[in-house]
Every structure is written in structure tokens, then in C-alpha cells.
Amino acid sequence: MKSMNELLAADSSHKEWVPLMELATREVFEMMLGCKLAAQPEIAVDGSFDITGMVGLAGQMCGVLTVRCTAKSAVLMASKMLGTEPAAGSQDVLDALGEICNMVAGNFKNKVAGMGDGCMLSVPTVITGNDYSLHSLADSGALEVNLLFESMPIAITLQIHS
Amino acid sequence: MNSIRALIIDDSSVMRKIVERSLRQAGIELTQVFEAGNGAEALGVLKENQVDLILCDINMPVMDGLEFIKQLPGVANAKDVPVVMITTEGSETHVVQALSCGARGYIRKPFTPEQVREQVMPVLGGKP
């Protein structure tokens, strides 16, 4: 029987995880924000996102999961979570996106067989602005899911280090 | 069931508000809600206040949820208060660990008000 590390090494692209990422994301939005995400016909241009939530994964799966969206989307997400409309850039908006990212990462890893116990999550980090480059130690291609939240694009990306 | 006093422990203020709203949506009447950002803060709240239910995250800075429930028996007016964990850590090992530390219920994030009701009502002596 192969160990989890051997299984990870056997297929470093992990494309089979993309549907799990999408399902994990859809569940978080449906259960915590009360809204369904739609499929996005075109991949959004990176520069259109100006807020990023990040959660690190360590253990049997190492990497970074990010949720990127526009500031307008982030305010709407926070509004749906809180039931009130927070100010753009307020702590509530940053906190809400960080929690969404945390829940997507946690829900995703719990769907990957054997990862629930073997993978830990970091505290979420939120970056505002889009003039930055993310250089993780990931050594396999990023997995990305693009969806529409209330007709606005969001991107969920997982960069994995084998 | 009478209305209750709840303590919600989570390092995210947004999540604390969501948990409170979910309790209300689950049909649980709240007379008073206390909040804490970690286990150490929560112990301080419990020394000054009486509550009927504690909902607690696991991964938090300063003092995590498992350490908090280990220390709970040392707080005179809180040692018998039921604790329900609410966390993204959803593996069986985490559930067993939390229950063996004294938690009475376990809710995985993301969650619905119905799932909150299913876990919370039995520990309050009601039907899920």
C-alpha cells in the first residue's frame, strides 16, 4: 500500500483535486453566505482582483490556497456573512475574506482522502491591492477554479509543494 | 426551552457574529451573548459571568480551544457548562480529541443553522 507522500509524488499535477476545490468553495458560499456560485465562462484577468485571502497548508500537503476577488465582491461577501454592510477596506471585510479562505481550505482538505489529519492550516492572511507577486515554494503547477459570485469573478488557487 | 446565555469563542469577529446569528436562526433564544477571541480571554469572561452554553473554535492564538476545555473544570461556575466545538478541523481524529477533552458536540465549518441546532439542542436538554 502506498503512503500519502508516495501518492502525492505519483501525480504531482493533482488535477483530480480541481472538482474538490470547486465543491469545497461552492459549499462555503451556499452554507455561510446563502448564495450559489455560477460557472465562469472566461478566466478572469489577474489585474482585475484587488484583494486576496491566503491560507498556508503544512504537513502531508504543503502549499498555499488563495481566494482572489474585487474589493466590491469582498464587501458584498462580508455583508452577506454579517447581515450588515461594512465599509470597504474595514476590518470586517478583511476578516470575512480571511474566514472564507480558511473555510474553503479546511473544507477542501477534509475532502481529500487522508488529508484531514495529515494537513494543518495556517491563520489566514489578507492582502489588499494587486501590485504584488506571490512567490511560494510550490513546485507543481497551480490548480485554479474560476467562479462567479453575484456575477463578479472570484478565483481560488492552490499552489502545492510536493 | 428557556432562553440561554452563550459564550462564543473565535479569533474571527465575523465568525462570532455568524455563530450568534446561526443560533438564533436555529430557534435558540439568547438572553445574553458573551464573546472572546481566544481561550484565555474566555476563561476571564467565565470568571465574571455565568453562561449556559459555550461554542468554541479550535485553532486560535494565545490559547486554543482544546487547551481551553482542559482548563474549564478549574473555573468554579463553568465546569459543568456544555461546550460545542465549531471548527474547520473536521477529521475524525480532531473530533475524538475534542470529545475526549470534554466537548459535548462538534460542528464543522461551513455549517447551516440546522447543523447548529442538531448539535446544540441535545446538550441543552432539548430535541435536535
Image (cartoon, helix red, strand yellow):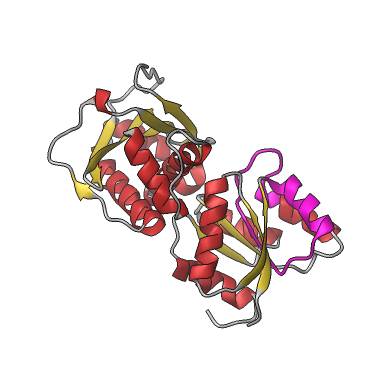
B118 is higher (above) or lower (below) than B34: below
Q: Residue B75: x, y in percent? A: 84, 58
Left or right side of B41 for A37:
left
A56 is higher (above) or lower (below) than B57: above
**Res. A146 image quadrant:** top left
Q: Residue A3: x, y in percent? A: 42, 40
* Quadrant location of the N terminus of chain B in the rendered image: bottom right
> Is residue A130 or residue A111 the one in the foreground?
A130
Q: Residue at x 64, y 74 (%)?
A: B123
> Is residue B96 or residue B72 the one in the foreground?
B72
> Is residue B92 or residue A67 the one in the foreground?
A67
Magenta span has A139?
no
Q: Residue at x 35, y 34 (%)?
A: A71
> Is residue B9 or residue B85 the one in the foreground?
B9
Determine if residue A105 is in view. Answer: yes
- Highlighted magenta segment, given as a residue range: B38-66
Q: Residue B65: x, y in percent? A: 66, 50
